[in-house]
């Protein structure tokens, strides 16, 4: 089986700063991968390169064997770390917008998730709390039948109970033949749902491993290992 | 029963142990159909691949079996479940005796203490 996402010697600089430095890794189908690193380590930059929002300086990145372009965008469902939706729109209008825009958006599924959360489809985005807005965005992203879900800090702004809900939504709604890349620094919350982890530090990958291997070989959780590797 | 994970061991081994416990305790009865991988994974808030791994290992041990189209079932062999129960009980007792020895209490004294405590608990 070919990789869902593959990076080869991927490098991205902002002036003299190397945000990504010779990154190499691949994500196999059906895996949930954690992209873990401290603030400013290059997590968001890497995700933005994969979505085509940033262009690498050198090296390559492919999605299902394709270069990052309009074709790959259909295959990638991206949750940015900030809200980019028009706040004055109603939730139902945003759903319609996504339905028009993406051929793989499953609007029935989106409404089903929305009703389970008791969010009114007629509320305007700006009237919703920060946590509820994040949930709406996640519903939009997870309602697409994509090959790769790129989730940038999906649980950053919400309380622990909502975090559990979000993680469960991710688990029960992703396309099983696809893969998920989740960036976060809230590791202990996310650890049980991950297959593999990538540790990134100053734009360089310091470790790629499966969660079970880390626990077997080190006798400690990914969270504990992270604290060791990134000790300040 | 609530799913719970320690930090020092792989998650799939802990899932395996907890499903085994549910079988022994009768929460999943002999011959009963288990929930699907996805349902179980969602219930435990773990990765479906991890749950799959735990179930495959349980299958190898014979405690559960899969039927190609209809899912996974708990074994109908009650003596096998009973045997697993005994093995686990033995392990727990060994652990306990070891802990008591570390406290400086020998097995004979431990048994006496246990009888006394058990009596008080049932009062």
Image (tube, coloured by chain):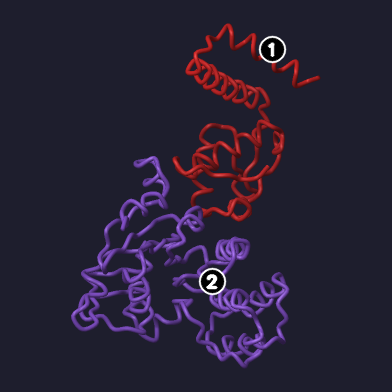
Label 2: chain letter: A
Is the same chain shared between marks 1 and 2? no
Percent across and percent down for residue B95 are 52, 22
Q: Name the residue at 38% across, 64% down.
A: A35
Which structural element holds mark 1? helix
Label 1: chain letter: B
**A118 on left or right of A218:** right
Percent across and percent down for residue A14 are 24, 82
**From the viewer's perspective, is residue B121 above or below residue A186?**
above
Q: Which chain is purple?
A: A
Q: Give whichever of B68, A208 is nearer the camera.
A: A208
Percent across and percent down for residue B48 are 53, 54
Q: Name the residue at 69% across, 17% down.
A: B117
Q: Which chain is red?
A: B
In the picture, the disc for residue B96 is none
Percent across and percent down for residue A133 are 60, 79
Q: Are marks 1 and 2 in contact (CB under 8 Å)?
A: no
Residue at the spot of label 1:
B115
Which structural element holds mark 2? loop
Q: Residue furthest right?
A: B123
The answer to which quarter of the image holds residue B114 is: top right
Whether residue A117 is visible = yes
**From the viewer's perspective, is residue B43 above or below residue B25?**
below
Q: Name the residue at 69% across, 71% down.
A: A117
Q: Look at the image and tell me in which quarter the C terminus of chain A lies.
A: bottom left
In the picture, the disc for residue A157 is 2
Q: Name the residue at 59% across, 12% down.
A: B110
**From the viewer's perspective, is residue A170 above or below residue A229?**
below
Q: Give whichever of A121, A131 is nearer the camera.
A: A131
Number of numbered discs visible in the structure rendering: 2
């Amino acid at each position: 089986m070919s990789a869902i996402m593959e990076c080869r010697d991927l490098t991205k600089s902002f002036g003299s700063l190397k945000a990504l430095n010779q990154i190499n890794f691949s994500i196999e189908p059906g895996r949930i991968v954690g992209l873990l690193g401290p603030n400013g380590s290059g997590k968001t930059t890497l995700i933005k390169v994969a979505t085509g929002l940033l262009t690498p300086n050198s090296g390559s990145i492919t999605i299902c064997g394709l270069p990052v372009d309009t074709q790959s965008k259909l295959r990638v469902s991206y949750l940015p770390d900030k809200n980019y939706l028009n706040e004055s729109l109603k939730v139902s209008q945003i759903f319609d917008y996504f339905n028009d825009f993406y051929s793989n958006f499953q609007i029935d599924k989106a409404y089903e998730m929305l009703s389970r959360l008791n969010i009114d489809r007629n509320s305007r985005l700006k009237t919703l709390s920060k946590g509820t807005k994040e949930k709406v965005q996640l519903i939009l992203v997870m309602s697409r039948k994509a090959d790769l879900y790129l989730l940038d800090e999906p649980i950053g702004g919400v309380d622990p109970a909502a975090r559990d809900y979000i993680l469960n939504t991710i688990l029960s709604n992703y396309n099983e033949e696809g893969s998920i890349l989740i960036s976060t620094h809230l590791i202990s919350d996310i650890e049980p749902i991950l297959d593999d982890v990538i540790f990134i530090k100053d734009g360089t990958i310091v470790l790629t491993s499966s969660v079970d291997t880390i626990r077997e070989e080190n006798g400690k959780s990914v969270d504990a290992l992270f604290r060791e590797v990134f000790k300040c | 029963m609530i799913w719970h994970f320690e930090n020092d061991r792989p998650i799939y081994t802990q899932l395996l142990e907890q499903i085994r416990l549910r079988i022994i305790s009768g929460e999943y009865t002999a011959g009963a159909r288990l929930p699907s991988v996805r349902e179980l994974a969602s219930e435990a808030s773990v990765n479906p691949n991890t749950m799959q791994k735990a179930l495959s290992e349980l299958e190898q041990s014979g405690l559960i079996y899969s039927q190609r189209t209809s899912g996974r079932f708990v074994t109908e062999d009650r003596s096998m479940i009973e045997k697993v129960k005994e093995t686990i009980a033995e392990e727990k007792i060994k652990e306990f005796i070891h802990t008591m020895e570390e406290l400086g209490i020998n097995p004979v004294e431990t048994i006496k203490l246990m009888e006394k405590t058990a009596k008080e608990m049932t009062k």
